[in-house]
């Protein structure tokens, strides 16, 4: 087994992008697209400077600098694995309090894009209102000390301030995180934070800085011993942070880059003014589908997503919920057959080589449920359609948060709000309405009788008879 190397001279690359958040997804997605572009002999002035603002990012920096910022990416095709070394990043900036090196790099004129993968929950959005949370502790700290910010957004603001003072055009801020309207969300966070310390700068940013929306997609499992052993099989045993991923990838972006952009359309990126349509399709069908298979699998002690898909009850549950309660409310998408798209999703979930864990899919339900499940519930209710399956998904999540599987095995904490959710889930065992009384998750759905009544019935049945019996009852 061998791996491929970049076809271009990395010494001739020059930076055009600062990317904050060098996790697995970025290195298997954006960095791969740029590597493909560079291999074509194009865009060599768009290399990446890596960056991070959290203490753990320093560990990634150490690992990548030790291998000249090359990343191992292993594609897990059932027909055979392939490995490549991605060379799109040429340096990793120091990770330090106050982020001086990051701010200085973003202020450089040749940096025309600042991109981010800081997780769906990293944008300081109040879950109850969907708006920027000016009261978050990190936001208050940056507002009080804007010259030494600790957040990525504070650093972006400080760099934009330097560029404005120098007469340098602003860079484009491009979110690559998986959340609805990621560009609009990023704009709200950046301008909201700036407004707390410098309203004039906030107004300038709002008027002059582009925040394109984007839809990103590639299943990328966490790295552990299995993934490192794969890298070793390719002769890369010295890489502690290899990335594995499915063969499929997709990136749809608004073409809103006043400071220029790399010609990513040459390597399969779609530029569209209908990102919202692609995004809704992906978030509802794929991310919502992940929740549908994750919680029953987790409660039935199933370890991997492909094993959940091989379970006839879970597979049938996914098919019915998607067909009756999710897909009917997904608007048309340009040049896309939504039925064929769903079949592709099924194939991706069933790929045994990816070995995506149910635990990863169950993670952070308090952030994901209101984005991936609740909007489908609202659309179904508005149309007078069924919500029994989605109510069962929510009941399964609640039952999961109680902290034990159907067999009695303990579930390790798996949500930033785990302690609170576990207390609430145990109370909901005899009073299901308490779970729905979370306005930041469900809004007013506790008063929507068809959904609330179904949730009550399913949660009581899950406790009384278990997950398998509940799925059988739903499937009739």
Image (tube, grey):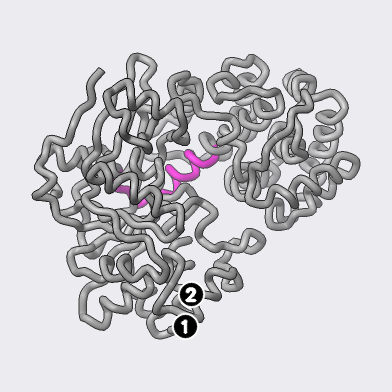
| Residue 86 position (above or below residue 189) | above
Please provide the residue range marked out in magenta. 270-284
Res. 379 visible in picture? no
Give the labeled residue for mark 2. Answer: 142
Image coordinates of residue 264 in percent, x first then y, are 23, 45
Q: Residues within 10 Å of mark 2 (few under 14, many from 20)?
A: many
Image coordinates of residue 293 in percent, x first then y, are 61, 28
Res. 312 visible in picture? yes
Residue shown at the point (34%, 45%) measured from the top left = 63
- Contact (CB < 8 A) between labels 1 and 2? yes
Residue at the far right in the pictured view: 430
Residue 376 is marked as none
Disc with the residue nearer the chain's start (1 vs 2): 2
Residue 197 is marked as 1
Whether residue 390 sits left or right of residue 333 in the image: it is: right
Most foreground residue, 54 or 390: 54
Residue shown at the point (61%, 45%) measured from the top left = 364
The mark closer to the camera, 1 or 2, is 2
Inter-mark Cα distance, 1 to 2: 9 Å
């Amino acid at each position: 087994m061998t791996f491929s190397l970049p076809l271009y001279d990395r010494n001739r690359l020059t930076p055009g992008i600062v990317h904050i958040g060098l996790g697995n997804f970025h290195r298997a997605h954006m960095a791969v697209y740029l590597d493909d572009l560079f291999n074509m002999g194009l865009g060599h002035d768009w290399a990446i400077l890596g960056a991070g603002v959290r203490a753990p990012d320093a560990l990634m920096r150490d690992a990548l600098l030790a291998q000249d910022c090359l990343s191992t990416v292993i594609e897990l095709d059932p027909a055979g694995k392939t490995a490549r070394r991605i060379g799109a990043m040429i340096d990793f900036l120091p990770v330090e309090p106050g982020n001086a090196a990051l701010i200085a790099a973003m202020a450089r004129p040749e940096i025309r894009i600042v991109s981010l993968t800081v997780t769906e929950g990293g944008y300081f959005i109040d879950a109850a209102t969907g708006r920027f949370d000016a009261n978050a502790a990190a936001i208050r700290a940056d507002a009080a000390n804007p010259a030494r910010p600790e957040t990525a957004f504070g650093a972006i603001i400080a760099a934009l301030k330097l560029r404005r003072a120098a007469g340098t055009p602003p860079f484009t801020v491009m979110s690559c995180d998986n959340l609805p309207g990621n560009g609009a969300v990023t704009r709200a966070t950046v301008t909201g934070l700036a407004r707390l310390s410098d309203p004039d700068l906030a107004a300038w940013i709002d008027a002059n800085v582009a925040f394109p929306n984007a839809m990103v997609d590639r299943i990328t499992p966490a790295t552990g011993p299995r993934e490192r052993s794969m890298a070793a099989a390719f002769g890369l045993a010295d890489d502690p942070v290899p990335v594995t991923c499915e063969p499929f990838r997709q990136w749809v972006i608004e073409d809103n880059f006043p400071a220029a952009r790399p010609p990513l359309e040459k390597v399969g990126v779609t530029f569209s003014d209908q990102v919202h349509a692609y995004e809704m399709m992906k978030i509802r069908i794929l991310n919502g589908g992940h929740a549908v298979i994750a919680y029953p699998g987790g409660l039935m002690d199933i370890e991997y997503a492909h094993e959940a898909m091989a379970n006839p009850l879970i597979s049938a549950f996914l098919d019915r919920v998607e067909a009756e309660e999710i897909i009917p409310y997904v608007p048309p998408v340009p040049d896309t057959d939504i039925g064929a798209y769903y079949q592709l999703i099924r194939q991706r979930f069933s790929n045994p080589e990816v070995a995506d864990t149910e635990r990863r899919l169950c993670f952070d339900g308090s952030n994901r449920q209101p984005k991936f499940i609740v909007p489908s519930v609202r659309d179904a209710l508005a149309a007078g359609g069924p919500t029994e399956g989605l109510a069962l998904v929510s009941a399964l999540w609640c039952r999961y948060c109680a902290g034990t599987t159907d067999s009695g095995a303990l579930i390790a904490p798996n949500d930033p709000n785990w302690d609170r959710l576990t207390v609430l889930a145990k109370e909901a065992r005899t009073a299901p309405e308490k779970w729905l009384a979370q306005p930041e998750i469900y809004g007013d759905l506790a008063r929507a009788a068809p959904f609330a009544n179904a949730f009550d019935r399913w949660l009581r049945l899950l406790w009384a008879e278990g997950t398998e019996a509940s799925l059988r009852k739903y499937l009739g």
